[in-house]
Structures are given as structure tokens and as C-alpha cells.
Amino acid sequence: MSKLGRILIKSLQEAIEMVKPSAGAEPSGPVAKSGIDGRAVGSIPATGAKVNPLHGPARWPKRGDTMKFLGRNGYDHELRAAMEVFNIGQEYKVRDCEVGDWSHCIWFEDFPYSWNGVMFELVG
């Protein structure tokens, strides 16, 4: 096995250890629920925080947060629609955010519809 392969395997093992649930831990906070037992999906059960193994717990936007439109990411049809409504680099106030298993949608004050959160960046 190559050195790169060993490094990747070690990184994955560390990431798995990081997200292993604690014995008897219950999820808390606003996380997606799934399955017969209602466990949190894609979260650390002890905290309910969504996790990216490479970057740690995510900070999802909440009402009143400011997001900047990046003008990139998302599906082509979503980005085309957003480019007609938002200005690249402009900041917008969050009205609501819904986090799913594979994506998150953001509603902004003074704008209709929800928008794919990957097209925006949390400001400060």
C-alpha cells in the first residue's frame, strides 16, 4: 500500500472515531430524524450537531444571520435562478433554514422561495 493510501485510511479511521456515538447518548437539538428508533441521521448523537469528518461540526444559519451570495455551487437550474435574483458578494438576512440529510435550504427576508444553502456563505 502506498504512503498516501495509509494516510487516507488513518484519516478515515480518525473521522469514524470522532463520530462514534457515546454509550447511551441521546440526540438533542434540531437534527433530521430517521428510522424506526428516531435516531438522528448524520449527527453526533451526544450533541445533535451535524458533522463533516474533514471539518468538524457544522454551524447552520439561523434567523437573523447574514449570508453572502457566492454565485457558484448548487445545481445548474438553481444557480441560474439565483443569479437572476441575488447579486454576487451581496449580503442577505436569513429568515429560516431547514437542514436535511443531504442538503440545506435557506429562506431570506424580502425574498420568496427557499434557496440551496451551498450557494451562500455565512458571514462573521
Image (spheres, grey):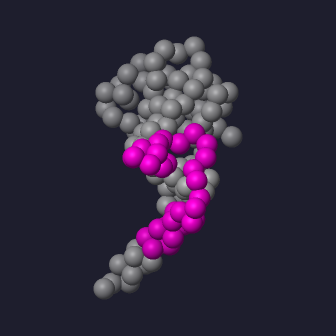
Q: Main secondary structure of the magenta part?
A: loop
| Residue 81 visible here | yes
Quadrant showing the N terminus = bottom left
| Residue 92 visible here | no
Q: Position of residue 78 (x, y in %)?
A: 36, 28
Q: Could you tell me which residue is drawn at 42 percent across and 44 percent down?
A: 34
Seen in the picture, residue 8 relative to 3 is either above or below; the reply is: above
Q: Nearer the viewer, residue 121 or 59?
A: 59
Q: Could you tell me which residue is drawn at 54 percent across and 31 percent down?
A: 97
Q: Could you tell me which residue is drawn at 57 percent across and 66 percent down?
A: 23
Quadrant showing the C terminus = top right
Q: Position of residue 123 (x, y in %)?
A: 64, 38
Q: Position of residue 8 (x, y in %)?
A: 40, 74
Does residue 77 appear left or right of residue 116 in this picture?
left
Q: Which residues are magenta?
A: 12-40
Q: Is residue 115 within the magenta segment?
A: no
